[in-house]
């Protein structure tokens, strides 16, 4: 499980900005590729109300998007940290010191947004490469087979 502070993560990309009306969809698409590659559940939390123009171009049962409405996203993320404190493999992605302290208090894993942004870029590169035709196994297929044989 990964809990992401959405606005912090957007700020970790030099080329994304909140003036772009499609910024939420762009970050969702990056996270979508990551969740497919690593088959992981993600809760993505944004401050404020859901923009009218925001729609998911891709369906993904692994990603749950929350807009905080009148609350601060930090409050929701802190509540989620406490809710998932029993799950020691829960990762919280934020650059907010207040959240990082709560993550440590709940003995969860903290990842800086800049670090996680580089993971998203790598996942995007891998999934883009995997969609190109090749006579060899692509990285996704290779990983699936490695997982299969590790179970044997």
Image (tube, rainbow, N blue to C red):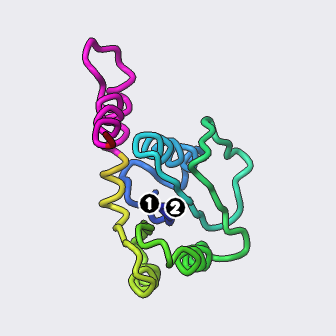
The CA distance from mark 2 to mark 1 is 5 Å
Q: Nearer the viewer, residue 134 or 120?
A: 134
Spot occupied by residue 15 in the image (x, y as percentages of width and height): 39, 48
Q: Is residue 91 depicted above or below 42 in this figure? A: below
Which residue is pictured at 62% across the width and 74% down the height? 76
Q: Nearer the viewer, residue 27 or 22?
A: 27
Residue 9 is marked as 1
Q: Residues within 10 Å of mark 1 (few under 14, many from 20)?
A: many
Spot occupied by residue 47 in the image (x, y as percentages of width and height): 61, 67
Q: Residues within 10 Å of mark 2 (few under 14, many from 20)?
A: many
Mark 2 sits on what residue?
Answer: 6
Pointers 2 and 1 in contact (CB under 8 A)?
Answer: yes
Relative side of 146 to 49, left or right: left
Relative side of 33 to 71, left or right: left
Locate the C terminus by quadrant. top left
Instruction: Tell me where residue 146 sits by quadrant.
Output: top left
Q: Which residues are magenta?
A: 121-150
Q: Helix, strand, or loop for circle 1?
A: helix
């Amino acid at each position: 499980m990964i809990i992401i502070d959405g606005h912090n993560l957007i700020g970790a990309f030099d080329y994304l900005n909140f003036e772009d009306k499609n910024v939420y969809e762009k970050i969702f698409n990056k996270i979508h590729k990551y969740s497919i590659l690593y088959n992981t559940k993600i809760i993505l939390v944004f401050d404020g109300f859901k923009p009218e123009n925001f729609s998911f171009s891709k369906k993904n049962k692994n990603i749950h998007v929350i807009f905080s409405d009148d609350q601060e996203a930090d409050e929701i993320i802190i509540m989620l940290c406490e809710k998932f404190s029993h799950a020691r493999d829960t990762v919280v992605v934020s650059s907010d010191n207040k959240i990082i302290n709560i993550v440590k208090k709940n003995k969860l894993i903290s990842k800086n947004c800049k670090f996680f942004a580089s993971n998203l870029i790598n996942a995007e590169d891998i999934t883009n490469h995997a969609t190109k035709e090749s006579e060899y196994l692509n990285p996704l297929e290779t990983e699936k087979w490695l997982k299969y044989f590790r179970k044997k």
